[in-house]
């Protein structure tokens, strides 16, 4: 794989979620910084970070057929071929799936794992219902990793449940991001610790807790919950009450507050062990209390027929796996690329991949937010619209909700749901986690939800876009200068 590395642009700071409250003197200092000072701090902290300009997938795909793993390890070539043939049944073009399988097998060492059941969880109410139900039935272990954990209605409900499970003897491990959850009082976590919950704060802000400028801009943006080593949840939903109501209920409730539109995924089956490994590895990297691996890896059996790959990226990787995988899948697309993105401020290589796909006849459609908690990010993302529209990319903006989902479905057979945004922060500065699901059955579910989102979105036409005001153009150009920091 050829790589070309750009000069290292400066870093940036962003909190992806509700406004935060700064309690300590250190936090107050950060809050009081001017934008220019904050950007300068980030430049000092992350000046060496960069991304490859390109991930090449236009060369012939490897001749070797991908090996699929099952509950007990790698399948034979014949068994792997049988799994792939089953995935292709009913597909309009069976070669599309084989191409994606081959390219991904060449790109990452993370295994393709069959025998799983993947369920889409649309919006907070359905996700919280599934997550809390799974935790309530936990018998052995609960692992939770999140960016935002608020001491609100949802956060209190989780704490109460975790305290109950600890009283029943369930081992509970919780890792939260120091910046994303800085609004949560220390007493919240102290109460959990006192009950025996093992708690780790990722990159604390307070220097008295080990915080430093060196890692201030590197955040744990993952959302990952694993129960008994058998059920895993990931996606874009943080543990906070802003997700408590679905967008569809807004008019019925006569509530002026914007509802959040997001997506999670529930996974059962052998691939859960890979998500468990991701959690434990991250826990150990933060010097968390000892976890006894045998307690967290029960025997797993096939519970479905879906093929899933667990992907995780860290800010200190030379080439983040999720970024490389997304770019590879886009470059390999033959028919369609349907993206739902909460924060869209990608690098040039990503824009090049999307425009190249559109020009070769791929149906490229983006659904982006019309309303967001980060207006400057939306404005910066809009600075790419002209380039995309000229290439034939179709752009829609969701009108009735704060769009926070991070999903992609390609060729109807390659799907991903996770915590990764399509911006520099996710690509370079955050630790992220995604699930990749291969096959037409799950792809159909993803496409169905994509069409529902599009029905509630307004299309941005090239004709109308070119007639926007000079002020809007200035805002876009100016805001785009800070894209690395968002």
Image: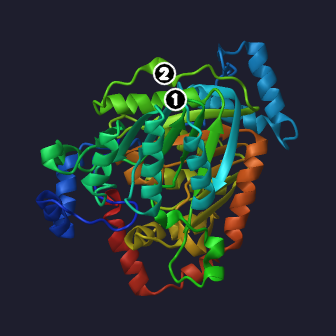
Observer-nearest of 398 and 353: 398
Say what secondary structure mark 1 lies in: loop
Hey, which quadrant is residue 260 in on the image? Answer: bottom right
Query: Residue pushed farthest top?
Result: 76
Tell me if label 2 and label 1 are in contact, CB under 8 Å: yes
- Residue at figure coordinates x 56%, y 49% from the top left: 132
- Residue at figure coordinates x 74%, y 14% from the top left: 77
Say what secondary structure mark 2 lies in: helix
Q: Which residue is under mark 2?
A: 295
Task: Point out which mark residue 204 bears.
Answer: none
Hey, which quadrant is residue 25 in on the image? Answer: bottom left
Residue 441: give x, y in percent of width and height: 78, 43
Hey, which quadrant is residue 436 in on the image? Answer: top right
Residue 380: give x, y in percent of width and height: 41, 68
Query: How crowded is the residue under tag 2: few (<14 C-alpha within 10 Å), some, or many (20+)?
Result: few
Between circles 2 and 1, the one closer to the viewer is 1
């Amino acid at each position: 794989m050829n790589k070309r590395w750009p000069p290292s642009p400066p870093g940036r700071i962003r909190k992806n979620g509700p406004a935060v409250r700064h309690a300590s003197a250190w936090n107050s200092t950060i809050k009081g910084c001017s934008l220019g000072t904050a950007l300068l701090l980030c430049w000092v902290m992350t000046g060496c970070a960069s991304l490859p300009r390109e991930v090449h997938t236009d060369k012939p795909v490897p001749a070797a057929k991908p090996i699929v793993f099952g509950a007990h390890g790698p399948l034979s070539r014949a068994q792997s071929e049988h799994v792939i043939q089953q995935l292709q049944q009913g597909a309009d073009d069976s070669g599309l799936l084989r191409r994606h399988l081959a390219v991904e097998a060449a790109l990452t060492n993370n295994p393709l794992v069959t025998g799983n059941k993947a369920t889409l969880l649309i919006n907070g109410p359905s996700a919280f219902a599934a997550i809390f139900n799974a935790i309530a039935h936990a018998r052995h272990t609960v692992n939770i990793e999140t960016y935002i954990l608020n001491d609100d209605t949802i956060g209190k409900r989780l704490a109460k449940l975790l305290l109950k499970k600890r009283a029943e003897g369930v081992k509970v491990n919780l890792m939260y991001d120091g910046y994303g959850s800085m609004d949560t009082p220390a007493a919240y976590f102290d109460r959990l610790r006192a009950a025996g919950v093992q708690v780790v704060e990722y990159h604390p802000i307070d220097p008295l807790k080990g915080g430093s400028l060196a890692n201030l801009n590197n955040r744990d943006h993952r959302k990952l919950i694993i129960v008994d080593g058998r059920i895993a949840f990931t996606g874009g939903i943080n543990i906070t009450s802003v997700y408590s109501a679905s967008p569809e209920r807004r008019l019925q409730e006569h509530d002026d507050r914007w509802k959040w539109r997001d997506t999670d995924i529930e996974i059962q089956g052998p691939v859960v062990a890979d998500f468990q490994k991701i959690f434990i590895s991250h826990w150990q990297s933060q010097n968390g209390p000892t976890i006894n691996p045998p307690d967290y890896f029960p025997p797993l059996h096939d519970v479905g027929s879906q093929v899933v790959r667990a992907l995780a990226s860290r800010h200190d990787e030379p080439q983040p796996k999720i970024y490389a995988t997304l770019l590879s899948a886009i470059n390999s697309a033959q028919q369609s690329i349907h993206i739902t993105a909460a924060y869209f401020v990608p690098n040039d290589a990503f824009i090049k991949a999307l425009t190249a796909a559109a020009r070769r006849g791929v149906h490229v459609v983006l659904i982006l937010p019309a309303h967001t908690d980060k207006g400057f990010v939306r404005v910066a993302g809009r600075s790419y619209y002209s380039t995309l529209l000229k290439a034939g990319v179709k752009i829609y903006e969701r009108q009735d909700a704060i769009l926070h989902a991070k999903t992609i479905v390609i060729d109807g057979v390659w799907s991903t749901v996770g915590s990764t945004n399509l911006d520099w922060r996710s690509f370079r500065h955050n630790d992220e986690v995604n699930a990749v699901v291969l096959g037409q059955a799950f792809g159909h579910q993803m496409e169905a939800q994509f069409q529902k989102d599009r029905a509630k979105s307004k299309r941005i036409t090239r004709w109308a876009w070119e007639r926007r005001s000079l002020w809007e153009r200035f805002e876009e150009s100016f805001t785009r200068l800070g894209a690395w920091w968002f």
